[in-house]
Amino acid sequence: MLGQQSTHPAMMTGKPTTAASRFYPWLVFALSFGLLLSDYMSRQVLNAVFPLLKAEWALSDTELGALGGVVALMVGLLTFPLSILADRWGRVRSLTLMAALWSVATLGCALANSFGEMFIARLCVGIGEAAYGSVGIAVVLSVFPRHLRASLSSAFIAGGARFGAGHGRRRHLSAHFGWRWAFAGMALFGLVLVVIYRAVITEPRLLNERRKLGEDLATDARRESLAMRPLLSALFSAPSILCAYVGSALQLLVMGALLAWMPSFLSRYYGMATDRAGMTAAAFVLAAGAGMVICGALTDWVARKAPSRKWLMAMAYSLTCCALLTVAFRLPAGGAQLALIGLGMLLVGGTAGPASAVVANLTRPAIHATAFATLTLANNLLGLAPGPFLTGVIADRVGLLGALQVVPLTGLLAAACFVAGRRYYAADLQRLEHQRALRDAQQANA
């Protein structure tokens, strides 16, 4: 199908034929955003019921951290191979299959009767979610202009944090009907979205939107023939893209730890009941989601004439967040502490948009799903997976408060990576443009 579509003259020349549709791209964004919301709600619903599971099954903080981290671990291990398959098999078909799998697995969590059963169900959730973030964002960016990449990337990724809007309601649901209904509700939500997405979003419509934007789709027809060696070279040869991978992951380690443990922190140190702790934690998570969108839009505005400023913005977000959270968790419980935590949460995911935009700028559109898969792999293996688990391990030794005092310092390492990335960015972009010019010349001669 991809090969047949690319034979259209306008596609081969890369020139737009009509004004791009204003409605369909935003419909793609809305439905993809909705599925990402389901993705993270299915992943993070566990955090809302940590205290209930801890009491019912007598689990340690390390075991709770393992249940939270296994999903991110599977995402990290499988996102790269599954994204490569999605680039070849079809992104829309792959997305709907993934969403159906994680929704059914979440239903399995509702039926679990022991730590072992819950662990297996959570592992399956991770398999289903493995490549959604990378493939989904590739679908979204494919139907929008390049200058919106940081804003759209941050807004899309913020879908993961926006689950906070339902975080408190899941706590309320679990408090009144039991934790099993919290999982069951997330599963049904995901399955309904799968049906709608599959009916509305199609590969031919996506290709048509790209053609209207003037994208050169000839490379799409050669996606299947892309060899592994040049693919790996495109993904890992530039020093700046390596810095973006690692810096983004280290900052998200802080975010993953806070999202997982904030409800428990409020329950233990503020004496909040389950439902109230959930509502309060929801406000912090909403701050993280809003902060991603704001930071992404601000980055696009600041870097509109100087792309390298994306690195400066990422550095600023990491360092400021580190300072705010480090001070916050050393204050006594009270309004001042909660206020500083809230400010830190506004910036904790702020690097997601700049990092995604850098990765998109340093790779060809034909491999964007695989490029974002690599970013997702780094984010999960180095950040989201170890974040909750390491926090739980440290908490079993020095207490949860002590663990949360240490974790934000990871932001210093993230900032160091962004400093290094900025140093190489201009040269890497120039080299990429030179390679594209050579490739175009070879194709013209052929």
Image (cartoon, rainbow, N blue to C red):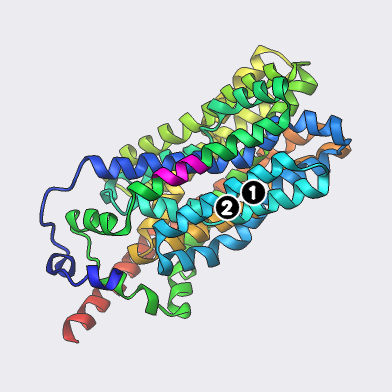
Q: Nearer the viewer, residue 338 or 141?
A: 141
| x and y percentages locating residue 404 in the rendered image | 73, 33
Q: Quadrant of the N terminus?
A: bottom left
The residue at the point 70 percent across, 43 percent down is 109
Residue pointed to by mark 2: 101
Farthest residue to the top: give it: 335
Mark 1–mark 2 contact, CB under 8 Å? yes
Which span of residues is magenta-colored?
191-196
Q: Residue 195 in magenta?
A: yes
Q: Residue furthest bottom?
A: 446
**Residue type, label 2:** Leu
Image point (32%, 76%), residue name: 222
Give residue 2's quadrant in the image. Answer: bottom left
Q: Is residue 33 magenta?
A: no
Q: Residue at x 58, y 57 (%)?
A: 378
Q: Main secondary structure of the magenta part?
A: helix
Q: Secondary structure at mark 1?
A: helix
Q: Quadrant of the C terminus?
A: bottom left
Q: Which residue is mark 1?
A: 105
Query: Residue at (88%, 39%) from the top-left corner?
Result: 397
Out of 398 and 5, give the one closest to the viewer. 5
Q: Is residue 123 above or below residue 288?
A: below
